[in-house]
Image: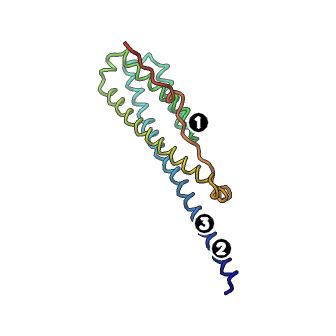
Amino acid sequence: MSLPLLLTLLAAALLVTWVVTVYNRLVRLRNQVRTAWADIDVQLIRRHDLVPQLVSAVGAYAGHERAVLETVTELRAQALAQTAPARLAHVEDQLEQAIGRLFALKEAYPDLKASENFAQLQRDLVEVEEHLQYARRFYNGAVRDHNDAIQRFPDLILAGPLGFKSAEFFEAGDAQRAAVKVELP
């Protein structure tokens, strides 16, 4: 076997090894993004399952607060219909604000404030929100790693032709970005 032929075979073997390695890494990162999105979806489903119970509990004590109850119900339906992370983040931000208004009603209704069912729903929702925040951070980290990999040279040479596309971040809405206001006595 001649030296040029041997060098050509070695170069071809290295090229094939590089292509396989890059492809497998990109697939792993894409799957990590999909898994992280599924984790967010699970938490959102948990939140969405709590909303009707919360609306029902508030409605039992504050039935004439229809506007707030209808807003929460409508936003829940919109959130269930969304699939794109950017649009879903916007709707979820609005839902979070509306749920906050729903919780604010407890101050005006002492019976609601004293309700153990309402208190348990509030605790459950806080737990879901904590899990959701963790899932969002994990998802955005997975998106960052994925997007970095497909935009980095020399991997970008293969990423586009192999069908790898940038993933969307799940961005915080305006309410989540707003500074917390502290009122001093």
Q: Which residue is mark 3?
A: 18
Q: Which residue is mark 2?
A: 12
Q: Residue at x 56, y 40 (%)?
A: 85
Q: CA distance from mark 3 to mark 2?
A: 10 Å
Would you identify the image quadrant in which residue 89 lies? top right
| Sequence-first disc among 3 and 2 | 2
Q: In the image, is residue 4 above or below residue 184?
A: below
Q: Is there any visible trace of residue 37 in the rendered image?
A: no
Dots 1, 3 in contact, CB < 8 A: no
| Sequence-first disc among 1 and 2 | 2
* Element type at mark 1: helix
Q: Residue at x 65, y 73 (%)?
A: 11
Query: At which x and y percent is residue 106?
Result: 37, 19
Query: At which x and y percent is residue 19?
Result: 62, 65
Outermost residue toward the top in this view: 185
User: Badge 1: few (under 14), some or many (20 or more) residues near its Cα, within 10 Å?
Assistant: some
Q: CA distance from mark 1 to mark 3?
A: 37 Å
Would you identify the image quadrant in which residue 185 lies? top left
